[in-house]
Image (tube, helix red, strand yellow):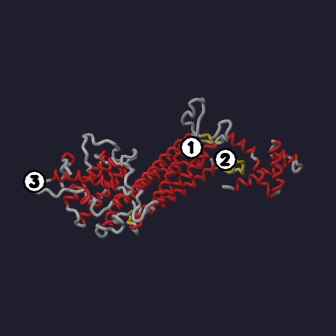
Amino acid sequence: MKKRSKHAARRPRSQLRVAAGPKQAQAAESPLPQSNERQADGEVLWGKQTQASLRYFNIGEHRFSPRFIAVLVTIKRACAQVNRQHRRLTAEHCDAIVWACDAILAGDHGAQFPLRIWQTGSGTQTNMNVNEVIASLANSYLAESGQGGAQPESIHPNDHVNRSQSSNDVFPCAMHILVATQTQQQLLPALALMDRVLSQKQAEFHEIYSVGRTHLMDALPIRSGAILSAYLSQLTAARNAIEQSLEAVYSLALGGTAVGSGANAPAQFGQQVIALLAAHYQLPFSQHPNLYAAVSSEDALLRYSAALKQLAASLQKMANDFRLLGSGPRCGFNEWHLPANEPGSSIMPGKVNPTQCEALSMVCLQIFGNDLTVALAVSSGQLQLNTYRPVILHNLLESIDLLSDAMNAFSEHCIDGFTLNQAQIDLNMRNNLSVITLLTPELGYDVAAEIARTAQLKNLPLSAAAEILGLYTQEQFELLLLESLNRHFSAIK
């Protein structure tokens, strides 16, 4: 591989960082520049395997996220350190690889990772793309760092950068790390924001009663805050499912190499690299207890995807409820006033639509589709390797990004600004025939049903229907109903 000296600035060996510290953590979590073009000077740092992949897998426009490349590079950096400890890399080669990784993590070479997601199912092309770029930069560093003595052996992408590794354990390791970090940094904070905003609204509306509805038909009255408490409970359950699924995601395949046996890796190599990664990311990563399973399957990510689907189902329910209760303003439910963020129609003046509900709902449908893809991909592995990993990663990252953004938008632009239409709620409460349910212990089901049917057929209040049937005067019935309502309201949360 040709050396390109202008990419390496000479630096004393003493300044090379051997342990992953705060500066490396910051670099790894700063997105690499996304670019589909070569570097500004037109120079290419990748090698023949990357070039071949560009030719043979020119499929679609989806490329691996810079965040994923950063995780792969961070793994390569840690592997070089541990290979040096095992004397499988010289000090010079380790320092050069570490320097190259740091240069990539600093964001200088984002255009050197152009490969599509739609490639080999093990991710080998992208693993080699990273190996080749690191090797090219490391060789430039060696050329610049020479002091007139004998030059060390050139760094090879397979023999040195990929030493003690396989695409089959490195790629799934990077997948798990990125899913875990993005969950902690994006998804769970978005969930926490929604929980906080909903809790504030629940407290605000706690004392206001409104008509409950089942089958979209009038039912017993409930507190308006209770409606929101149901959403909060569902979100808590979804968060618990996500956090529980992460326990398996923290188990990494590194050290299994090609088929899970650990061939060509020194004893304890995987555990030692993972210890560096756990310290770097400040997450409880550990080696999978069965590396054969870790390489051949992706059960942990399947369970994680199912937890995302659970969250999406809860969000879809909430979005639909907001949309129904906010429908109107004259001919719908019209009990909730949703924020009028923008004009709703290009032809109907004054129309405002539940746009945040619609956006969140579409995101949820996409998550359902992504989960189906993940399930099919996990179930379709054969023998000692799952060969659908790029599409699994693509769908999971899209789900995390979409859910995080949609929850933030819905919390800030819908939940936080919605109010109750007290006048409409009061009118509906007065017209609600289902409150007769509270009197069935005293009247009996058949008598209560006859009063409700008469009120509905003759368009009368319940008290007038009871009087027509000769059961009570209107005053007696209204007093009886008021006593029942007070007992009911004092009993419900």
- Quadrant in which the C terminus is drawn: bottom right
Work out how far the residue at label 3 is from the one at label 1, CA to CA, in angstroms: 68 Å
Identify the element where label 2 is drawn. loop
Instruction: Give the mark nearest the N terminus, 3 or 1.
Output: 3
Snapshot quadrant of residue 180: bottom left
**In the displayed structure image, the side of residue 467 where residue 114 appears, left or right:** left
Task: Examine the rendered structure and indicate whether residue 465 appears above or below residue 20.
Answer: above
Q: Which residue is mark 3?
A: 148
Q: Name the residue: 33% across, 53% down.
A: 125
User: Dot 1 corresponds to which residue?
Assistant: 357
Provide residue 440's location: percent of width, then percent of height: 79, 56
Residue ranking furthest to the right: 470
Q: Secondary structure at mark 3?
A: loop
The residue wearing badge 2 is 208
What is the spatial separation of the Cα atoms under label 3 and label 2, in whole angstroms? Answer: 83 Å
The amino acid pointed to by label 3 is: Gly
